[in-house]
């Protein structure tokens, strides 16, 4: 793709995200979401492969439907209350429609079918954008309307997302699909707490985005898309593979790594809100996703594929790892000890 065109699309993405996050009026928020959708489409379909075109089409149709629902929800609310302010979403039907629209935008169960397919058809760098920055505007809208959302509906969506995200990721061999189901599972954790403590949702999202960025950038460096190629990639940059193992375990939420922090705080908050059964259920369901993280981690560092033929190992590269990956990896692994300071900032 032409570098100038690429730059325009990236700037449009940042612009759309900024407009949505900083707006008070529903029409402006909707405009930001539309700019985002239109800017990411060329980035998804830039390889001109049939699967990439299919992914872009699926993404466009889903996001268009979700945007129409956002507009419909805000118009219904304005009709009943005379308010176009995002924080004044008080009508129950509008809240319900908005929750469905945002769930569709994010890929929460039962509106999750598009996300693994789109991620599988996109390049790794676009997949990184889809998993992180594209989820920020919908989460910001949920954050601004959190006081008027239906807790029962969100808890149901969250538990279903964690269950299906873990369950459907178990038999995947494509790493991008595994990361898509991982994303769905993490969104469940964010959705369950949004009504009770919206700041925790944002903290969870920031840490999730950081760890996912680390994994996508690492995979992009070692040029790996499937589990079978991941098994033989350790000869390229062994130190980076060792760090990938730790980042995957951090994304799984194992102590004493960074990923344990949001899970710990969410379980604590749910228990305070007398929702111990929901906390227990969502914790048990996250064990499903722990299984495929461990599978990825095992393939990353420990195994070679079992066969009798002589296998070609990949040449070790001499190029140094980028500073960005080094910083992100360190933060993805080592932030738990400074959690009191993180909590004072948040």
Image (cartoon, rainbow, N blue to C red):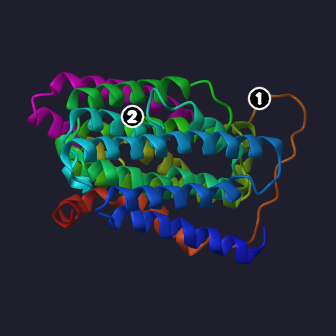
For marks 1 and 2, give the one nearer the viewer: 2
**Residue at which label 2 appears:** 100
Most frequent secondary structure within the magenta stretch:
helix
Can you say which quadrant of the picture contains the N terminus? bottom right
Q: Which residues are the magenta region?
A: 266-295
Q: Residues within 10 Å of mark 1 (few under 14, many from 20)?
A: few
Q: Is residue 318 left or right of residue 244?
A: right
Q: Nearer the viewer, residue 113 or 327?
A: 113
Residue 238 position, x and y percent, is: 65, 57
Q: Residue at x 64, y 58 (%)?
A: 125
Residue 218, visible in the rendered structure? no
Q: Under tag 1, what secondary structure?
A: loop
Residue reaching furthest to the bottom: 4
Task: Say if 228 sits above or below 152 in the image.
Answer: below
Q: Is residue 233 left or right of residue 183?
A: right
Q: CA distance from mark 1 to mark 2?
A: 45 Å
Q: Residue at x 41, y 24 (%)?
A: 163
The tag on residue 306 is 1
Residue reaching furthest to the right: 309
């Amino acid at each position: 793709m032409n570098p100038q065109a690429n730059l325009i699309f990236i700037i449009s993405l940042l612009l759309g995200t900024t407009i949505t996050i900083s707006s008070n009026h529903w029409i402006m928020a909707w405009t930001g979401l539309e700019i985002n959708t239109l800017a990411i489409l060329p980035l998804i379909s830039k390889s001109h492969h049939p699967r990439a075109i299919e992914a872009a089409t699926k993404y466009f149709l889903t996001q268009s439907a979700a945007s129409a629902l956002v507009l419909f929800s805000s118009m219904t609310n304005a009709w009943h209350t005379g308010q176009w302010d995002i924080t004044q979403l008080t009508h129950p039907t509008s809240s319900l429609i908005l929750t469905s629209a945002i769930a569709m935008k994010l890929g929460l169960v039962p509106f999750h079918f598009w996300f693994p397919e789109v991620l599988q058809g996109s390049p790794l760098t676009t997949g990184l954008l889809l998993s992180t920055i594209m989820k920020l505007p919908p989460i910001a809208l949920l954050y601004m309307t959190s006081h008027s959302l239906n807790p029962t509906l969100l808890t149901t969506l969250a538990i279903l997302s964690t269950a299906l995200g873990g369950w459907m990721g178990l038999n995947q061999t494509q790493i991008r699909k595994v990361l898509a189901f991982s994303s769905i599972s993490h969104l469940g954790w964010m959705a369950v707490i949004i009504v009770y403590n919206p700041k925790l949702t944002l903290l969870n999202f920031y840490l999730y985005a950081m760890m996912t960025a680390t994994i996508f950038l690492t995979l992009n460096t070692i040029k790996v898309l499937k589990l079978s190629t991941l098994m033989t990639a350790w000869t390229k940059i062994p130190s980076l593979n060792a760090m990938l193992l730790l980042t995957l375990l951090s994304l799984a939420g194992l102590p004493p790594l960074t990923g344990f922090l949001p899970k710990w705080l969410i379980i604590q908050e749910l228990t305070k809100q007398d929702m111990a059964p929901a906390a227990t259920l969502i914790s048990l369901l996250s064990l499903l996703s722990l299984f495929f993280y461990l599978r990825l981690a095992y393939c990353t560092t420990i195994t070679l594929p079992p066969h009798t033929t002589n296998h070609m190992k990949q040449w070790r590269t001499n190029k140094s790892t980028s500073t960005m990956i080094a910083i992100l990896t360190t933060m993805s692994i080592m932030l738990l000890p400074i959690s009191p300071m993180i909590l004072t900032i948040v």
